[in-house]
Image (cartoon, coloured by chain):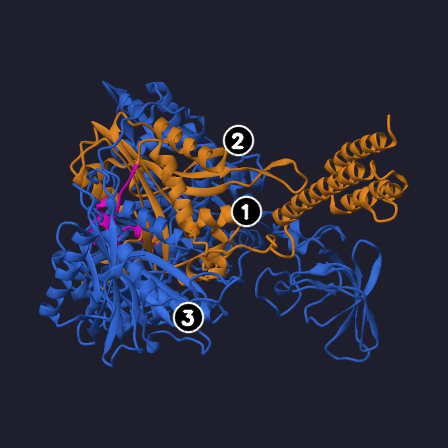
Amino acid sequence: MNVSRRWLQAVAPGLDLDAGEIAARLAMRGAPVERITDLAAEIAGVVIGRVQRVRRHPNADRLSVCEVDGGNGTVQVVCGAPNVRAGACYPFVPVGAVLPGDVRIKRVRIRGQESRGMLCSARELGLGTDHRGILELAGQFDPGSPFAPTVGLDDHRLDVEVSPNRGDLLSHMGVARELVGEGGIRLADLPGAVEHELTVRTGSPAVDGAGVRVRIDDPRQCWRYMAAVVRGVRVGPSPEWLASRLRAAGAHPINNVVDATNYVLLELGQPLHAFDLARVAGPGIVVRGARQGETVRTLDGERRELDEGMLLICDPGEALAIAGVMGGSDSEIGEGTTDVLLECALFNPKGVRAVRRALGMSTDASYRFERGVDPAGLELAIRRTVSIIVATAGGEPAPTLLDACPRPWRAPVVALRPERVGRLLGVRFEAGDIVDLLEPLGYRCSPAAGAIEVTVPGHRSYDTLREVDLVEEIARVHGYDRFPDGLGAFRPGTVPDDPLLRLHDRLRTILVGRGFLEAHTTAFAPAEEGEVEVLNPVSAEESHLRRTVLFGLLHAVEHNFARGARDIRLFDMGAVFGGDGSGGLPRETNRLAVAMTGRRRPHHWSAGDRPWDEWELRGLAEELAAAVRPGECSVEPGTFDSTFFEEGCEFLLRAADGSAVGGAGRVSADRVDAPVWAGPVWGLELELGDGVRRRPDPAFRPLPAFPAVERDLALLIPDSLPARQVLEFLEKGGGRDLVGVSVFDLFRGGDVADGYRSVGFRLRFQSGRRTLTDSAVDRAVRRLVQRLKEEFGVEPRAGAAGPGR
Amino acid sequence: MSEAGSLVDELRALEREAQNAIAGTSDPAALEQVRVAFLGRREGRVSRILRQLGGLGPEARPAVGAEANRVKQVLRGALEERERRFARERADTGTPARDLTLPGRDRWRGARHPVTLVVDEICDIFARLGFTRARGPEAETEWYNFVALNTPLDHPAADEQDTLYLKGGGLLRSHTSPVQIRILEEYRPPVRILAPGPAYRRDTWDATHAPAFFQIEGLAVDEGITFVDFKATLSEFARRFWGPGTRVRFRPGYFPFTEPSAEVDVKRRVVGADGRVEETAWLEIMGAGMVDPAVLENVGIDPERYSGWAFGMGPARIAMLKYGITDIRMLYENDIRFLSQFA
């Protein structure tokens, strides 16, 4: 809402504040000012100039040479405007002053004649679009005095941010009421505007009078329709006081009739519409729903196709306007208009909202109807508009105001318990205090037993219908800053700290400790990366919800590759979405993704670099799996998501129940756009579940009392036999005293035959009851070798079993 | 006293003197001077005594010679010992042989995302005020995102958030407030939770807008919770987060699911370029208010008995303010040169 400071002061004569002070006060009332524009600042250098003499330019037909008194003596100015005349006053820019757009006026020669300054049109001053001639000022002024005040521009425009519940602040009267209270506001004095003797004739659903019939066919959407007729108007430009007031509030003057309706819209908040009565058949107004296939051409020149039931203002034949949204161009006020039909109506906010959304438009009128127009303010608004039209366009008002009113408004009454006010706000308010706080806003209070009966004024009848709404009004007017803020006692909540968020914390600690950077990717993905489609996406890249988190991380890897980075380690945790959830919603699960490429550690001068490899990846996968699913997640060669990893270089993470919960591997070359110098990219994706699986408390085992004995065993294992099987056989079959088996060496070539590799296992024996003798351990190893031969046909490498390190 | 006896005494005095001189040296150059002064071939004081041996009688010569050799040996040993000590010290402070000034083996430094840092800090502060963390789905229904939060879809308030809808039903939550409803359906008061997580709006990317952004929801519901508690708790948070001396301002605002509603601003104290403490402009940090009784009714909680307050905060915006980041897109580009600054 654009508010003019001067206009505010015209409706609130006691408001003795500058623009900044007004803004500060509004902010603390819940209507912050986004911007204050000093309307005079841009044209501060422009003064009044009086043209003393005009003669034709000796060398150009279209130009004249003027002598202009700009306050500092008379100067010669060459002017191209056809309307310049001696004796009149114009806005004048002397040499050295600056025009809007940072144009500095210089001394120039035009066709041999010196010109020392410039006489301006309205457009050159940013005051409008009129460029047909220079702006002649009505009346006489002192040459050299500042120009801005003469056109009402010593003003400020405040852009007030009005929340959706406060439709009452979408007018100067409403803002003024908030600032100074009901008692301090009144209608502004307007030159020539007088009150006319008009009688209201009410009917429902139809009413006749003033030669017009008004009928409401849809009382659900149109609650009230008032109409007035003014005959014999002369349509033309508005007088300067009206035009400049509209300009100050950011509106463009159009003509005196339309400007009168816009003036009242901005002053009282009531949208009005003026029809050319000659274009209204009947003449009669029918407020009804649109018929199938009906269209109307609106004021903006668009032909609008209407849905059945959209509320229209019609004559008995066809549609004239879209109710509460926009008028039609066929009945528009034009230069030839002599008789005017004024509409001042009250429409259902939800209906107006539905129609204007369906049509994809929003106007000053629809904006106010949606937020609620004062149902008690219609008569004042239409009388005011008639007065202004007669004052500026002449004509004679018909003595009857028509009022079709199928839904008479009755002020709501709300019971307000002072005890409840204190209980919610934490500060005690007496009934008398409450009355003093509410009445300036227009509420009428009558104390009754235990509660105050609060009668709600029309302008607040949309948003303060409950006791709690009035509690807010009390807090707001009392001032939020006046409530104490000392911390009191509290009871801890019953909600446990979310286990998944706790798991997030643990995973972050692990990965950050391993040198990984936490990325933030979004849930959006292009079509090929997601199953769930967004109906109204911002872009094709964000048209779906992601199926994996890794996809976004690989995108981030590419971003960093493109900036020359070789060593990249990223992770992120977030939701992924699938198509088959319950309750009409997608299936949503939480995942961790990790991506890395380049070197395992920063380069050090003492040694060469080692890149990430499958063993680093596997180790990391095992560590993360253990953090996510303690003791019940295995890592094995296999495929989790076939689209990401290279075949033969991928791991599958499996939960205890056998279900696949994640994968890791070397990212396929076609999944990541890598420069030639980049190393392989490794990735991991892991389902996090809900995080409720916690590691069970460790059960303490006594420390071993007897020494351990180690034996190394190199076995020749054919390539067809996975080493894991041998490892597991050793772990299970080695007896109670075999407490650990690890792989310490892998060897091919040399004396090892083709198709075989030598795998070195280190076996660790330890007993809880005695010191193991070498011979007992050797017997155990020989037994194992024998059983391996029987089970797998595996032989020890020559000189096999030996002592450990 | 014989001539030989006095020479032997002289040698022993020289030995003591030399030992003291060696012990008093602080660097190899001084040590060399001491060596030359006592054992120098021509001018060394021990050498000069040895040169006098020729003038002695044959019976005195062996005793003095033996003593002179002993003193030479002892002093050489002391010089070497001193030299070794200097060498050890050189090794400790870096010599060409083992130059420990060279850089050590570095490790990659990981980092939490700057938004995570802010979320964690906020959650830590509220944890001390009795709050736990909660979570809800990001794909939501209109009921949880709007209706249960007292935001009818046919009201202009629903326009404030341009919502992304999903094919097949549902929408992407436009704020974290649906978690309020989900938690109040599941748990009875007292409830004190924070719900950090992503929210989504139909915004195009620019320096200050992102279609996906983090939010932190806060909710406290119990008997006897008042506007004063609300102001007190959030003021306490603001002072702990932004530092003591921070001023907190509550302005009336509008949210369909709180009443009274407030916008919360802070004015921080910062040390300016000239070293003086100055106050920043007011910064808007959250929207908040007392839980609207209609919201409590929607989850079956009696608003006559229970009351509460709630807030919504944007940790991305706070991270930008805190770390001086000027473009929100930096938070989602995942440029490692950016992310590693938070290590």
Secondary element under disc 1, as helix, strand or loop, is loop
Q: Which chain carries label 2?
A: B
Calculate the distance from the C-alpha at mark 1 to the C-alpha at mark 2: 54 Å
**Which of the two marks, 1 or 3, is nearer to us in this view?**
3
The residue beneath circle 1 is A191
To the question of a shared chain for discs 3 and 2, the answer is: no
As for residue B144 lying within the magenta part, the answer is yes
Q: Residue at x 58, y 54 (%)?
A: A240
Decide if residue A522 is on the left or right side of residue A396: left
Q: Where's residue A505, x and y in %?
A: 33, 47
Q: Chain A is drawn in which colour?
A: blue
> Residue B245 got which mark?
2
Numbered range of the magenta stretch: B132-159
In space, the residues marked 3 and 2 are separated at their CA atoms by: 45 Å
How many other residues sit within 10 Å of disc 1, few (<14), some (14-19) or many (≥20)? Answer: few
User: What is the letter of the orange chain?
Assistant: B
Kind of residue at badge 1 = Pro
Query: Depth check: A628 or A173 in front?
Result: A628
Residue A715 appears anywhere in the view: yes
* Residue A170 locus on image (x, y percent): 41, 47
Q: In which quarter of the image is residue B8?
A: top right
Give the mark, 1 or 3, whose residue is nearer the N terminus. 1
**How many neighbours does mark 2 have within 10 angstroms: few (below 14), some (14-19), or many (20 or more)?**
few
**Which mark is drawn over residue A558?**
3
Residue A530 in sight from this viewpoint: no
